[in-house]
Image: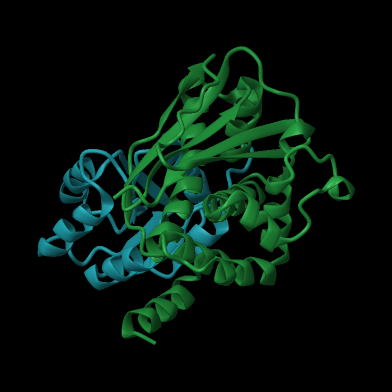
Chain colours: A green, B cyan
Amino acid sequence: MPPDINQYKELARRYGIAATPESVSRLTQLVARQDSCVDEIVRVIEKDPALSARLLRVANPRAADESEYTVGTVDEALMRNGIGCALLLAMGTPLSLALVKTFQTMLSLKLDSVDLHQLDSLSGPHMRGSIGFSGKVVGHVFLRMSFATAKAIAAGILGLSETELKDVDEIRDASGELLNIMTGNFKSNLCDAGLDCKLQPPKVGMTEDYSTPIEPGGGLERLAFKAGKIEIFVEVTANPWSD
Amino acid sequence: MAIKILSVDDSRTIRLIVGKAFRPYEVTLLEAANGEEGLAVAAREKPDLIILDVTMPVMDGVTMLTKLKEDPALKGIPVIMLTAESGRENVLQIARLGVRDYLVKPFKEDQLIEKAGRCVTLEKRPVATPA
């Protein structure tokens, strides 16, 4: 094991830094290489029940539940959808883990990852945050939610009631920080997999624009989350093979 | 006398959370929104502890930490990094520059208090009693 890895493990233990699940790190490393063997990717995903379940959900977009799956195995899902499918899984999982952990840690709320069709679609003006990243991988992460949800989250993070929030800037800043935390954890996983990249400053504001520009040559992963009345949509578009 | 803690973060939300965490203690909280402001406040106020973010506009946390450690008057101030970035290279680089501790966002206020308590003595504010 290289000395840097040992040194990092010792520091992570001392500082109490939780590691990204091994399966997610390994999958990111594999999809970062364009010449990865599909069998190896299949083996990594199959060993992790959560990754396998998500891949099959992505591969069966019209199915309401598992009984309606037409694609039943990880192998088949990758053969039909290609390596891009595994890439989106590798990109979306750290974002999903970080968002769920943020809710648990800072709001004491259990946020569940749900299928997109289980949530009502946003309509009209909504809060949208975006962060771009560039380097060996290029792309964007988008966070979307209603203004009411953004307000509830800001109040929860700051330990205030919604009426105690001073202004819209406070709500916008809290949404931006939620996006920062999520994307920072996501970036760490990319960098550890050899995909060094830098984050651009977040942009947060109200919008009626629902379009998501997809990174040329890359893919788009849409995730949805729910905790009571709180409903959140996350989109990630990335291309690690741009150079 | 209250100890001085400097929170350097471009997010007002994080500065508010840090302020709330230290409210029960005899602490004067100083704030800065980027590394450049952070260095100026550190030079002027000589805080007892700095809580520092990594990704910030104008000057990032790694540059501020580097400059802090190059300054004989400031290099002894303990620094706790408070960041969402826990990538291997980031942690190794920051550890080499010399930080006292590292806290990854998302975090709980009591984790911050525990780590700060290892760097400085935190004394509870007296509870106000009705006259």
Q: Residue at x 41, y 51 (%)?
A: B27
In the current view of this chain or complex, which residue is farthest to the right? A67
- A206 or A92: nearer the eye? A92
Q: Picture coordinates of residue A242 (x, y %)?
A: 33, 47
Say which residue appears at 47% left-offset and 21% top-offset.
A205
Observer-nearest of A222 and A188: A222
Residue A19 shows up from this direction: no
Q: Residue at x 36, y 81 (%)?
A: A7
Q: Is residue A232 left or right of residue B73?
A: right
Q: Is residue B84 above or below residue A29?
A: above
Q: Is residue A242 above or below residue B92?
A: above
Q: Which image quadrant is residue B37 in?
A: top left
Residue located 53% across and 61% down the image: B111
Placement of the N terminus of chain A among the 4 image quadrants: bottom left
User: Residue A141's x, y, as percent?
Assistant: 47, 39
Residue A136 can be seen in this image: yes
Q: How many marks?
A: 0
Horizontal and vertical percent for residue B113? Answer: 50, 59
Name the foreground residue: A48 vs B59: A48
User: Which image quadrant is residue B100 in?
Assistant: bottom left
